[in-house]
Image (cartoon, helix red, strand yellow):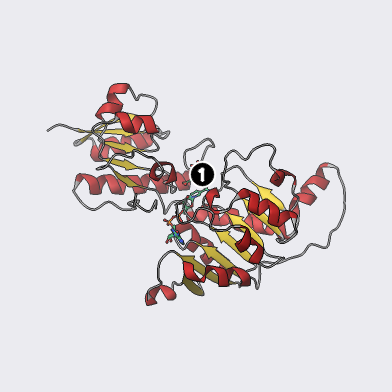
Amino acid sequence: MKKIQVLLKPQCNEEIQNQFATKFGDQCEFTFQGKETEDAIAAAEVVIGEPEEEEILKAENLRWIQLTWAGADKYTKMKAFPTGVTLTNASGAFGKIISEYVIGNIIALYRELPNYWKNKQKHLWVQKRSSETIYGKNILILGTGDIGRNIAYRMKAFETHVTGIKRTAVPEHLQQMKEFDEVYDLTALDQQLQKADIVIGCLPGTPETKGLLNYERLYSMKKDAILVNVGRGSLIPTEDLIRVLEEGNLKGAVLDVFETEPLPETSPLWNMENVLITPHIAGPSFGGNAGNAEVQAMIWNICMENMERYLNGKKLKNIVRLKDGY
Ligand SMILES: NC(=O)C1=CN([C@@H]2O[C@H](COP(=O)(O)OP(=O)(O)OC[C@H]3O[C@@H](n4cnc5c(N)ncnc54)[C@H](O)[C@@H]3O)[C@@H](O)[C@H]2O)C=CC1
Ligand SMILES: O=C(O)C(=O)COP(=O)(O)O
């Protein structure tokens, strides 16, 4: 029997390589990271990881790409994504780590911790009056997927009121999604934005989410509200956010993702004391930074479960719908 050619793009230690070989070696031949030749790319039926656009176009036998990221926008935006190739993502692996990032940064902003970090460097003992709590706040979470639910679940421990916004009409059973106090579809966004103390974006980058939090919507938020974005930067037009912050119409922001990444050196956001910025590290996979062992284990589990499904002709999990970009 001819073996299925599988290209594994992310860094993949010996243990993982052995697991793939032991589980699937009878049916598959693997090319691991760093060993990918032109021939291996052309022959690949399956790619696990994030192939470059030109690799996808060269892979004439390609049937399935299993991303190790949750965000699929790099691929759904491709003009010539080959028909007949199934795209699946790694949603399910990032919720826990990102929710810790979100809560930690909200507390840092509320208690003005960066100010104390600066003072520490100067050996300065200066007490400020910033003592805002998460307790009792209205939290609005845009996107009720893995990340949104994990944030909601943890926010409940702070005795908050948590509202979720999802894409489509809310069936009755979802109106009672246990992590949320309330769940609405997108038509409720404008009304809910006005009530929230903390708005958290954990939406995929799609044509529908692009520019959703525009100037008018940001302006409609409470003046002492804060905004967090850990989904995709395309949700918030940067110029609109800068304007609303410069006008003092938002208390502050926690931003891990941006319309343009890296965030340009000249962006006024860098100089704003009430804006916390990180360079797209909230939910690390195998990218530029070293990553987190638990997250990576969850990603490999998703990949291996789907590999098993693929080989057994079962429906894959986490299929990304190319037509609406998510
Ligand atoms: N900052 C970082 O390091 C990371 C960012 N991400 C981003 O976070 C996004 C979400 O990740 P997961 O929660 O794992 O994905 P998920 O697929 O589990 O959840 C996405 C949620 O967004 C909702 N949604 C989609 N389009 C919508 C719309 N137009 N309006 C309202 N709701 C909509 C869906 O209903 C779903 O509940 C990813 O697509 C990715 O872009 C993911 C991992 C790391
Ligand atoms: O999974 C995603 O969508 C991410 O944004 C993860 O990004 P990273 O792997 O840290 O480059």
Query: Foreground: 56 or 83?
Result: 83
Coordinates of residue 267 in the picture (x, y in percent):
68, 42
Asked whether residue 157 is in view, the answer is no
Is 326 on the left-hand or right-hand side of 2?
right
Looking at this view, name the residue that lies furthest to the left: 1
Q: Secondary structure at mark 1?
A: loop
Query: Foreground: 269 or 180?
Result: 269
Total marks shown come to 1
Is 136 on the left-hand or right-hand side of 23?
right
Using the image, determine if residue 79 lies above or below residue 54. Answer: below
Q: Is mark 1 within 8 Å of ligand 2?
A: yes
* Amino acid identity at mark 1: Pro
Asked whether residue 57 is in view, the answer is yes
Q: Quadrant of the N terminus?
A: top left
Quadrant in the rendering for residue 279:
top right
Query: Foreground: 16 or 166?
Result: 166
Coordinates of residue 301 in the picture (x, y in percent):
36, 48
Residue positioned 53% across, 70% down in the render = 163
Residue positioned 63% across, 45% down in the render = 278
Using the image, determine if residue 26 lies above or below residue 240. Answer: above
Coordinates of residue 198 in the picture (x, y in percent):
63, 64
Q: Which residue is mark 1?
A: 284
Q: Residues within 10 Å of mark 1 (few under 14, many from 20)?
A: many
Coordinates of residue 73 in the picture (x, y in percent):
43, 46
Residue positioned 23% across, 33% down in the render = 61
Residue positioned 41% across, 35% down in the render = 10
